Image: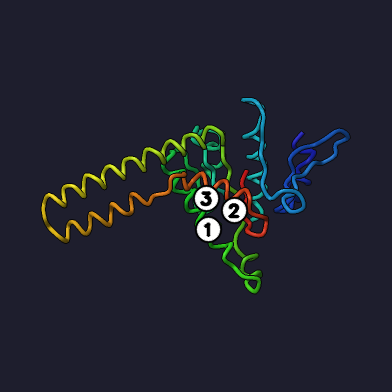
Amino acid sequence: DLDDIMEELLASPLDRPLIGVANGKRIVRMDLVNDSPHSLGSAGSGAGKSTLYKLIGMQRLRRGAYAIILDFKKWSHLRWAGQLPTGRVLIEDEVERIHNVLCRVLDELIWRKSFELEDEARLNALPTLDVFVEEINTLLDLLIDYWDAYVAREKQNARTALRIAKDSGDEYQIEQAEELYAEAMGLPKKSPAVQAIRYGVNLGREFRIHFH
């Protein structure tokens, strides 16, 4: 019964959210400091993965964390998280927007990683960020497909623009088109959004960005 654990639930520290009750009414907590700073839930459809992460997310938000929820299915967390203040929770369900958010998370990770030892107090004062990724295996495939299509489109557009510019004979237009062509040809082969996830889950707890 929820009433039986409400006191323990409300007392949960930021990095030790309650995740269940074992035999003998023993409280079970996740430990994001002494264990892993990230978590992975694996179970069949309808087994309660989203409900578990809802429980974790609400406790963490209550203690000051911020949350990014990436759910291309849209409805897994919308009913509860969609009613929370927009400044604390961001929900994205479109692949392009999920890609863009993950690129911003990667920028944040790289920025936080740039801090030196003398900046540790400043680093520790930065807000905690939880990134909840629903159906990660399927989402990774969608992100890869999105990026491949984007790169192919940008390269084709750049080739077309360069050909038109050369046909015009306008030196300025040719120079601009060549710059765009170089940028398109220099786009990374691998999805930056996928790299953000892989990079993020391999970084430690010091950066206060947690993937679930």
For disc 1, the neighbor class at 10 Å (few under 14, some 14 to 19, many from 20) is: some
Provide the secondary structure element on which disc 1 rests.
helix
In this orientation, which residue lies closer to the viewer: 32 or 53?
A: 32
* Quadrant showing the N terminus: top right
Residue at mark 2: 129
Q: Which mark is residue 108?
A: 1
Between marks 2 and 3 in the image, the one whose residue lies nearer the viewer: 2
In this orientation, which residue lies closer to the viewer: 181 or 131?
A: 181
Between marks 1 and 2 in the image, the one whose residue lies nearer the viewer: 1
Q: Is residue 134 left or right of residue 118?
A: left
- Residue furthest out toward the top: 45
Residue at mark 3: 85
> Mark 2 and mark 1 in contact (Cβ < 8 Å)?
yes
Name the residue at 56% across, 36% down: 136
Which percent across, then down, holds residue 186? 37, 52
For disc 2, the neighbor class at 10 Å (few under 14, some 14 to 19, many from 20) is: many
Label whose residue precedes the other's in the sequence (3 or 1)? 3
